[in-house]
Image (cartoon, grey):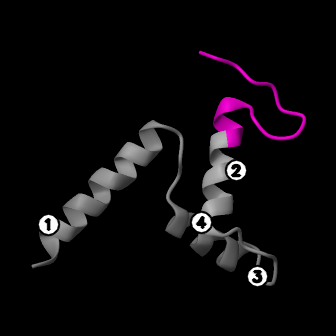
């Protein structure tokens, strides 16, 4: 019965997008299709990158509280 699994996956994807974190599998598929041969971030690197982009962290980034 694939429906519950698909519904949960869609709910998780929607929740991630609501906080500004795109789906990792979409990212990997995009990198492999559009940028073959280039490195692909690990899941941990991807998550850190998205959080930094959203909240301005990381080297040279601005930090903000709200």
Q: Quadrant of residue 35?
A: bottom right
Magenta segment boundaries in residue numbering: 52-66
Q: Measure the alpha-carbon separation of dots 2 and 1.
A: 30 Å
Circle 1 SS class: helix
In screen coordinates, is 16 left or right of 53?
left
In screen coordinates, is 52 left or right of 28?
right
Circle 4 SS class: helix
Q: Measure the alpha-carbon separation of dots 2 and 3.
A: 20 Å
Pair 4/1: label in front: 4
Nearest to N terminus: mark 4 or mark 1: 1
Q: Residue 40: percent from the left, percent from the top?
A: 72, 73
Residue neighbourhood size for the residue with mark 2, other residues' Cα within 10 Å, grouped as few (<14), some (14–19), many (≥20)? some
Pair 4/3: label in front: 4
Nearest to N terminus: mark 2 or mark 1: 1
In this figure, which residue is indicated by the disc labeled 3? 36
Circle 2 SS class: helix
In this figure, which residue is indicated by the disc labeled 4? 43
In this figure, which residue is indicated by the disc labeled 2? 49
């Amino acid at each position: 019965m694939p429906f519950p699994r698909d519904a949960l996956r869609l709910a998780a994807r929607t929740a991630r997008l609501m906080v500004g974190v795109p789906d990792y599998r979409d990212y990997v598929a995009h990198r492999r299709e559009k940028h073959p041969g280039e490195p692909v971030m690990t899941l941990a690197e991807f998550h850190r990158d998205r959080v930094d982009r959203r909240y301005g962290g990381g080297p040279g980034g601005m930090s903000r509280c709200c």
